[in-house]
Amino acid sequence: MLVTHSAVWRIEFRTDATRADAPVIPLGVLRESCVADDGRFLGLIFRPKLSPLESDKMNFDTWPELSEARLESFMNDLFERAWAQSCEAVDGTLGAERIAALYSQHSALTFLKSPARECQAQTWQRLQLSLHESLFDHETWLVPALTAPVLPMRRKPVVQPVHPQMSPEIVLKAA
């Protein structure tokens, strides 16, 4: 039986660290799992675009890597850096944990560790499938934090063209 040691990190951007009620913009979810005999799973799901209201709240001078043009490459780089780290199932150290430690909890960009559902399976292929499915269990975290309300547009009433009443005499003369 293969049993994992796992962790899930929510990658978020705090729009204002001085206010507790400031919007927090979800960017991605990173899940890593290690198996004692050197098996490893690393998965990342993220939002490729931010809503226009979220972009207005972002500080792209401080965090240019989070701009719409660079967000996907930043997330891919996070994945590559986490994958380059070693994963030790024996002592419980995960590679993604080392990447998360690079971003201070006092920073606008944070990695919040959440409890992960541990998975187990008889074969590595079944375990990978189960881990992949469990990554998408966290997809609901990636809903935009700031959106504009969609207001229905009132339709203009269709105005039928008004034809003047013609007398039969004029119509007959025109025919």
Image (cartoon, rainbow, N blue to C red):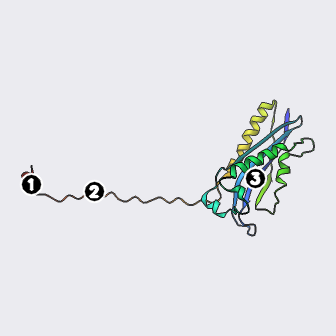
Residue 166 placed where, x, y %? 13, 57
Nearest to the observer: residue 158 or residue 77:
77
Q: Which mark is residue 168?
A: 1
Q: Label 2, on which residue?
A: 160
Residue 8's place in the image compared with 123, above or below, is below
User: How would you rate the neighbour count of disc 3 (Cα within 10 Å): few for under 14, some for 14-19, many for 20 or more?
Assistant: many
Cβ–Cβ below 8 Å for labels 3 and 2?
Answer: no
Residue 31 position, x and y percent, is 78, 45
x and y percentages locating residue 93 in the rendered image? 89, 46
Q: Is residue 117 visible?
A: no
Q: Is residue 133 above or below residue 21?
A: above
Question: Is 158 positioned to the left or the right of 22 in the image?
Answer: left
Q: Is residue 151 above or below residue 140?
A: below
Location of residue 110 by image quarter: bottom right
| Picture residue at 73% right of the left edge, 46% below the top | 76
Q: CA distance from mark 2 to mark 1?
A: 22 Å
- Relative placement, left or right, of 157 versus 71 is left
The secondary element bearing badge 2 is classed as loop
Secondary structure of residue under mark 1: helix
Residue 57: x and y in percent read 66, 64
Which residue has dot 3 on it? 10
Q: Name the residue at 72% across, 66% down.
A: 16
Q: Identify the residue at horizontal 81%, vertical 60% (top origin).
A: 105
Work out which quarter of the rendered image holds the N terminus and state it.
top right
Say what amino acid the circle numbered 1 marks: Pro
- Nearer the N terminus, badge 2 or badge 1? 2
The amino acid at mark 3 is: Arg
User: Which class describes the residues within 10 Å of circle 2: few (<14), some (14-19), or many (20+)?
Assistant: few
